[in-house]
Amino acid sequence: MAVYPGSFDPVTYGHMDILRRASLLFDRVLAAVSDNPQKNHTFPLPARIEMLEESLRELRLPKNKIRVESFSGLLVDYLKEKKTPILLRGLRVFSDFEYEFQMALMNRHLDPQVETVFLMPDASHIHLSSTLVKEIVSLGGEVRDLVPRCVLRHLKSAPAPNIP
Ligand code: ADP
């Protein structure tokens, strides 16, 4: 099993692309939604989980192939609790690389067993981020091609000052 942690604030077709690829590589994938009070999330944890769970149905995968859970605290402790050393992250553009490289090495420092695996999305998703989606929505732009349908609903009903 691999753990794919993230804010998913909200889930985009970029996350979904990584999850679909991961489902072909690993027997099971755990999408772990971070519950970090220090991060100023746009959507509360229950909404982020609900959007992810509903979006995953679009992939039509066998039941339990991808599960969604929340986690808090150190990722290496969560991996230990889940009894897997495999940490999955998505890599988009150069700007991701420095942060992801640092995190991967720090997690390895904290627990040498942990192995971070990076997957690249389809080129059509390389420019896509949750932050950009929220910015576009706040400026009245169209994001239909960027996020699953249930996310569109949430984005439309979110109180404007919350976005981004
Ligand atoms: P975090 O706050 O942990 O970075 P995100 O939800 O922003 O949470 O991202 C979770 C993971 O998904 C990260 O590894 C990020 O690089 C990856 N990711 C996000 N958007 C995309 C995308 N469009 N294509 C590929 N990977 C992505």
Image (spheres, rainbow, N blue to C red):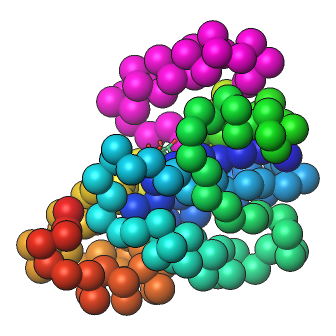
Instruction: Please indicate whether residue 143 sits to the left or right of residue 149 in the image.
Output: left
Q: Nearer the viewer, residue 18 or 163?
A: 163
- What's the residue at 55%, 78% (across, down)? 50
What secondary structure do most residues of the magenta stretch adopt?
A: helix
Instruction: Please indicate whether residue 122 sits to the left or right of residue 152 in the image.
Output: right
Q: Is residue 102 magenta?
A: yes
Pinpoint residue 121: horizontal percent, then vertical percent: 54, 49
Q: Nearer the viewer, residue 122 or 75?
A: 75
Pinpoint residue 12: horizontal percent, then vertical percent: 45, 65
Q: Give the quarter of the image for residue 86.
A: top right
Q: Magenta span covers which residues?
A: 90-115
Q: Give the quarter of the image for residue 162.
A: bottom left
Q: Is residue 123 visible?
A: no
Q: How many marks?
A: 0
Q: Is residue 83 visible?
A: yes
- What's the residue at 55%, 16% (across, down)? 106
Q: Quadrant of the C terminus?
A: bottom left
Instruction: Please indicate whether residue 91 sits to the left or right of residue 132 in the image.
Output: right
Farthest residue, direction right: 27
Q: Is residue 99 magenta?
A: yes
- What's the residue at 19%, 81% (across, down)? 159
Pinpoint residue 70: horizontal percent, then vertical percent: 61, 58
